[in-house]
Amino acid sequence: MIDHLQKIIQQRGPIQTIGVIGMGYVGIPAALLFAHVPSVKMVYGLQRNSLSSGYKISMLNAGELPLKGEEPNLPGLLKEVIALKKFRCTDDFSIIRSCDAVTIAIQTPFLNPLDLIPDFSALEEGIRQVGRYLTKGILIVLESTITPGTTIGIARKILEEKSGLVAGKDFALAHAPERVMVGRLIQNIQEHDRIVGGIDEISTSRACELYSMVLTKGKVIQMTATAAEVTKTAENTLRDLQIAAANQLALYCEAMGVNFYDVRAGVDSLKGDGITRAILWPGAGVGGHCLTKDTYHLERGVQASGIEPLDFPSGTDSLFVTARKINDFMPDHMFHLLKDGLKRIHKEIRGSRVALLGWAFLANTDDARNSPSELFYKRCLEVGAEVRVHDPWVKGTLISSSLEEVLTGADAVVIFTGHREYLSLNSQEIRKVMKKECPIIIDGRNIVDPDQYINLGFIYKGIGRGDKNNHQVITCPLQ
């Protein structure tokens, strides 16, 4: 006997019209890739016409990409699907009535991570909009990173209340979390395996049909909706943990006067069957929308949707929350390195001029969401320092595009982002522009040669560079 939902889906036929809600780093590349599939007739990018993001509608329809930074193949793909008249961006959510499938990619931050209450207001409004225009046989997929239990819980509840339809009977519902990194969006969607979890087998199968259309090297991995939610939050939590391990080891190396990068190479050299000792890189802080919050979604999931009580040492932070605290601490550590560097020339932070290089959290992009640079910037201002910011990718009232302007007269230069423009910094030119007898450089990404700067009279401090952070000061008069 054919299931009621399966019968409705068979009557609909293959997925040909798709709606993608949320025109950001996730939604735009997904929509364009769907539109590029020959069997797909039309893809609608659904975007609220708000003051903060409404501009994306006209830009996308004109073939202009609102995302900055380098995104290989994305600009050309946009122009191609626009020319083919297979993609259109709109704020008219009633177009959902004509769609066979709708994906939702809306950010899910925490207003205060410590209380483990996620801010689902934007996501819930997006789900309500979908619910108002649901038709029988449609597939709804949540791509946002969400607290485990959300798909079968609040998302299902809202969709059913707004539509009067029943999930699993009248429409399919699934979770297929995005797995993309800014700077390689198209490649990630096509080549990464896709986690797909429906609320039932039919929903899972229909979602697999949708994502199989855009996969090249990647394959579909099927599981339940809640397992898919745990998978996404866990993979980001584990990466955050790996970064925290590198950061803590770097702090240990600084305290013991050794070079973290020598230690890392030594540990990584141990290879063989069943041996895994790979270490990530330490840095000035972890930013972005995902790693800074997904630990808390996982923690919240255990509390909100756990089937049994969690058996864990009483009064102890989880390993994952501890890792999050370590990574959140790194901008403070950069501040401490700056303070120590200034102390070596008998100068206080108050009244000092600081050149902050890099506002984006990720190299060679304009993505400044939850940037660790901002935390450092605010800390410096609180103690009376003058901070000038440079970033070749990010635009803003606080940010200068002129490196020389930011460096001129600065007491210290602090590198927060590993942009390619900073890889070729000229130590002699920097010293001339700073016009200081003992200028200071704080390297948060290990991108400069310490000896080159030390030999020119700089005070050098770097994350993980215990071998250099207390170097002998070399007097080198300005020319």
Image: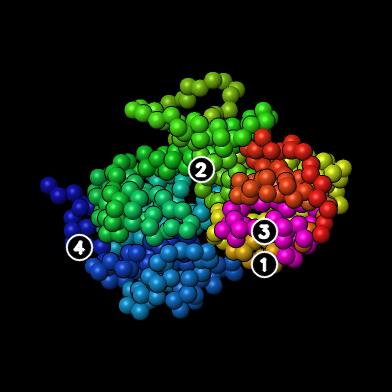
State the CA–CA distance, disc 2 to disc 4: 36 Å
Q: Is residue 276 above or below residue 328?
A: above
Q: Earlier in the sequence, mark 2 or mark 1?
A: 2
> For the residue marked with disc 4, what is the amino acid?
Gly
Task: Identify the image's colour scheme: rainbow, by chain, secondary structure or one colour.
Answer: rainbow
Q: Earlier in the sequence, mark 3 or mark 2?
A: 2
List the residue tagged with mark 1: 401
State the CA–CA distance, disc 4 to disc 3: 62 Å
> For the residue marked with disc 1, what is the amino acid?
Ser
Where residue 353 sits in the image (x, y, percent)?
81, 55
Of badges 4 and 3, the one in the foreground is 3
Query: Residue 424 magenta-drawn?
Result: yes
List the residue tagged with mark 2: 294
Front residue of 280 and 138:
280
State the CA–CA distance, disc 3 to disc 2: 39 Å
Where residue 237 sits in the image (x, y, percent)?
49, 39
Q: Earlier in the sequence, mark 2 or mark 4?
A: 4
Label ID, residue 426: 3
Q: Earlier in the sequence, mark 1 or mark 3?
A: 1
Q: Is residue 372 left or right of residue 300?
A: right
Q: Is residue 36 left or right of residue 342?
A: left
State the CA–CA distance, disc 1 to disc 3: 17 Å
Which secondary structure, mark 3? Answer: loop
For the point 58% across and 28% down, the residue is 317
Of badges 2 and 4, the one in the foreground is 2
State the CA–CA distance, disc 4 to disc 1: 52 Å
Where residue 89 sits in the image (x, y, percent)?
43, 72
Quadrant of image for the C terminus: bottom right
Answer yes or no: do the residues labelled 4 and 3 have beta carbons within 8 Å?
no
Front residue of 419 and 381:
419
Which secondary structure, mark 2? Answer: helix
**First to last magenta residue range:** 404-432
